[in-house]
Amino acid sequence: MILRGRCHVFGDQVDTDALAPGPYMRKPLPELASHCLEAVDPRFAREVQRGDIVVAGRGFGIGSSREQAVQALLHLGVAAVVATSFARIFYRNALNLGLPALACPALVVRAGDELEVRPQQGEIENLSQGTRFACEPIPAPLLAVVAAGGLMPWLEARLAARRGA
Amino acid sequence: MAGATLAEKILARASGQPRVRPGQIVTCAVDLLMMHDSGGPRRVAQRLAQLGARVWDPEKVVVVSDHFVPATDLDGAEILALTRRWAREQGVRHYDGVGICHVVLQEHGHVQPGMFCVGGDSHSPSGGAAGAYMVGVGATEVTGVLVTGEIWIKVPQTLRIDCAGRLGAGVSAKDVMLHLCARLGMNNDAFVVEYAGEAVAALSMSERLVLCNMAAELGAETGLVAPDATTLAALSEAGRPFAGDAGAWRSDDDARFDARVVVDAAALPPQVAAPHSPAHSDSVECAPRGVRIDQAYIGACTGAKLSDLRMAAAVLAGRKVAAGTRLLIAPASTAMTAQAAAEGTLATLTEAGAILLPTGCGACAGMGAGMLAAGETCIASTARNFKGRMGSAEAQVWLGSPYTVAASAVKGRIADPREFLA
Ligand code: SF4
């Protein structure tokens, strides 16, 4: 898996209420997603393009367990999230839903830089600046989930194996 | 060899290992799975159907409707109807609109010492008040647990927090947590937090719930309090007395804690968190005096249990809410509302001018009554004040204990509750 995209840069502690605001939580995903991150950057949901990459600081996704925080980003076409560190539930949710999430404390970027991300290898290349960074490894159980394409396909495979046995 | 921490003991038991170590990845059998109306059946029913799978053990699943309760629009009503139908079909226990999930689990004694539990909600660490290891996950992982009865966990390091001395008058578990959020920040994901010390031993189960609940705000894996006589009494009272050996569920005397923090509980003043983060906390004495309060909100699992209503009543007795300020109170369960009514606590609140709201998550997550308009300022007894959570992204939300919220409602600006309790 190789992902290439333009990055949008955010600060520390981007929370799940910013990603999936409560007042829209009972609404269908497209409506919810149109408010994604508006409390931090009102233009983001309008301007983000399919394949873009979100880059952020520490504690990305802190707060609620709501998976809509991940699904809103997926709906908007975000291909990966790279952060200094992640909140624990968001990190699991992202990889379970097939949104690559990579912790890369060393990453140096400017907004709009072109990045190439290789989740399984744990590598990021900043194509605009000609620099390369190593990410923290993804825990083995989640790597298996990523390889299967998410937790649902992983569960399907596991159930099929059980039925076959 | 050093002894084991409480968290390590529970994870070892749940994963069938003699011993586990921080950093190790283990697969744990789940003793209890909780989900609510927002992240539960609405999000997992279709997935289970798609997998053609059934609930691994209906006896171990509890559903609580609280987020959209009572329905305020058609979307919410449909979500609640779906939740009801699914729980009936699957034959799982369903608490339908009788309280907020974490409080309901505790009230009914579902979480027991030494258990390994999973909840489809980020404040699931609340279960740690009973000496159980309870983690929050998202709806896809809830589906995984429903199918397999298992989940993987990376054994965390243990951060031990010793609260020395007793909390002063007008100071509560909420103040301890706001203080810790400011002191330790919100990125403690490598840790499980174990609370101990004289102040913790003196706290009720409701107050211990706050300590564990807000481990989520520390960004920790979960929070824990070792079971003691208070725990066992509460479980007996809930009608589910603990049958095991509670003494087995404590950190060994020679356990190695990866980090230790001491809180001088006796000297801790009431805390308030400035917008838009619990980590922006400081002593109420340092809060700006001029901030006008439009809405004071006593609600949520963190801040509207019977003990919280009593804290508010202690401040409000014989007083009135300030003109231009509204005080909203949404009790955390219907049983607690009944108790507060029977003992007179509720009358004290309503005589002060409080507006009584239905039981449920309400405005805490911006889903029910009590949302904020742009430009408004609120002080709330909830756990988090992220931008836009309670309504408009242009609203300002402060956090405080129920004492502090009540005192601020009386003054119409942020106030130190100790002036009212002397
Ligand atoms: S009251 Fe608030 S914090 Fe508690 S479960 Fe409901 S939404 Fe979450």
Image: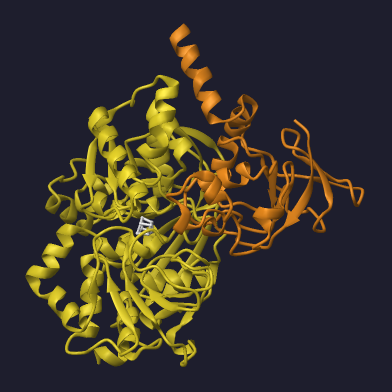
x and y percentages locating residue B345 in the rendered image:
14, 75
Q: Nearer the viewer, residue B136 or A77?
A: A77
Residue B393, can we see it? yes
x and y percentages locating residue A57 in the rendered image:
68, 59
For residue B116, side relative to residue B260 (left or right) = left
Letter of the chain shown yellow in the rendering: B
| Quadrant in the rendering for residue B80 | top left
Q: Nearer the viewer, residue B211 or B3?
A: B211
Q: Nearer the viewer, residue B132 or B91?
A: B91
Q: From what the image shows, is residue B343 above or below residue B91?
A: below
Q: From what the image shows, is residue B98 above or below residue B310?
A: above
For residue A91, side relative to residue B62 (left or right) = right
Report the label total: 0
- Name of the residue lying farthest toward the top: A165
Residue visible at 24% across and 52% down in the picture: B104
Residue visible at 61% across and 25% down in the picture: A148
Residue visible at 44% across and 71% down in the picture: B178
For residue B348, side relative to residue A133 (left or right) = left
Which colour is chain A painted? Answer: orange
- Name of the residue lying farthest toward the left: B342
Residue B210, can we see it? no
| Quadrant in the rendering for residue A149 | top right
In which quadrant of the rendered image does the N terminus of chain A lie?
A: top right
Residue visible at 32% across and 84% down in the picture: B409
| Quadrant in the rendering for residue B83 | top left
Q: Nearer the viewer, residue B221 or B66?
A: B66
- Name of the residue lying farthest toward the right: A130
x and y percentages locating residue B95 in the rendered image:
22, 45
x and y percentages locating residue B416 in the rendered image:
36, 88
Which coloring applies here? by chain
In which quadrant of this rendering is ligand 1 seen?
bottom left
